[in-house]
Amino acid sequence: MLRGDSIERSATEEQLLRAHAVEHLDRLREIEGPEHLDPDTVASETSWEAVTLAAGITLEAVDRNGFALIRPPGHHALADRAMGFCLINNVVVAARYAQAELGLERIAILDWDVHHGNGTEAIVRDDESIFFVSLHQWPFYPGTGGPDTTSWNILNVPLPGGSGDAEYATALARIVEPRVADFGPDLLLVSAGFDAHADDPLGDMQLTANGFRELASRATQLAPRVAAVLEGGYNLETLPALVEAALEGFAS
């Protein structure tokens, strides 16, 4: 995975509209001061610039086979509303960009954030060209992605609290890798959350830096092209080392 310099790139409204309703974009653009969009999600007059930059850097990561280190995260954002710290669903914007502008036809999305990527699932459900996989703590916020919620293009792998490196590796090998191989993606996009780490304050999982390194390394075997975008991760002391571990895995 390519490492690059700090860059600035904004997604266009046309690119955002491939994942979101125009009314949602208009609301974000028109915010004039701090405002709660849901109990967990605050936006302000600078949020529109922030989300267009975040989505744009995610598109740059697709172009470079890179890792977009951005905020705010995106995988809870629905087509028509913000949710769970997320305003724009960066990974879906990137998937549809890869199809519409780069000519890549089949996109797989692997989400290993501690929370289920409900927004991503909702937007891509029944899209035969996108295969979505989520490994997440269950039961847990946002209450979706539980047992028996898998469909032909959605693979939910709910894991109990306390799961660590071994449990994630087993789930990847036994459940995820065969289904992704059957789908045969041209591009894998990783929603790389780090809140499943043992020291993260929001989750109850036990992944280590080595666990994230292994997840990233195995992800590189799933498609000829791989790019990633930062999702959760709320221990600012451990987050840099975890991202570094994932970058090492992606480069292996």
Image (cartoon, rainbow, N blue to C red):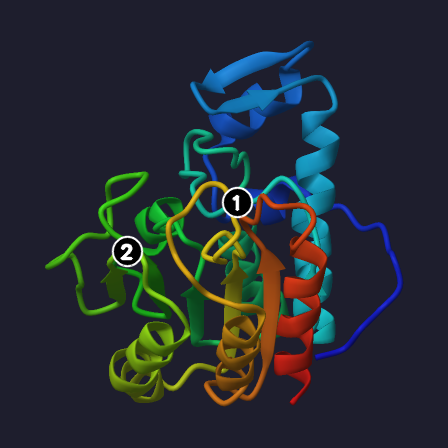
Q: Mark 2 highlights which residue?
A: 125
Asked if residue 60 is positioned above or below residue 74 in the image, the reply reads below
Q: How many marks?
A: 2
Task: Name the residue rendered at 54%, 48% in the picture.
Answer: 232
Please give the name of the residue rendered at 71% of the width and 69% of the height, measured from the top-left corner: 244
- Contact (Cβ within 8 Å) of mark 1 with mark 2: no
> Residue 195: where, in percent of width, then height?
50, 51
Looking at the image, is mark 1 or mark 2 nearer the viewer?
1
Q: Quadrant of residue 81?
A: top left
Q: Which residue is mark 1?
A: 74
- Residue for point 57% across, 12% down: 35
Instruction: Tell me the quarter of the picture where residue 62 sits.
Output: bottom right
Classify the position of the C terminus by image quarter: bottom right
| Residue 11 visible within the image | no
**Does 211 appear above or below 42?**
below
Q: Secondary structure at mark 2?
A: loop
| Amino acid at dot 2 | Arg
Q: Is 153 positioned to the left or the right of 230 in the image?
A: left
How many neighbours does mark 2 have within 10 angstroms: few (below 14), some (14-19), or many (20 or more)? some
Task: Measure the C-alpha gap from mark 1 to mark 2.
Answer: 17 Å
Q: Is residue 92 left or right of residue 145?
A: right
Q: Earlier in the sequence, mark 1 or mark 2?
A: 1
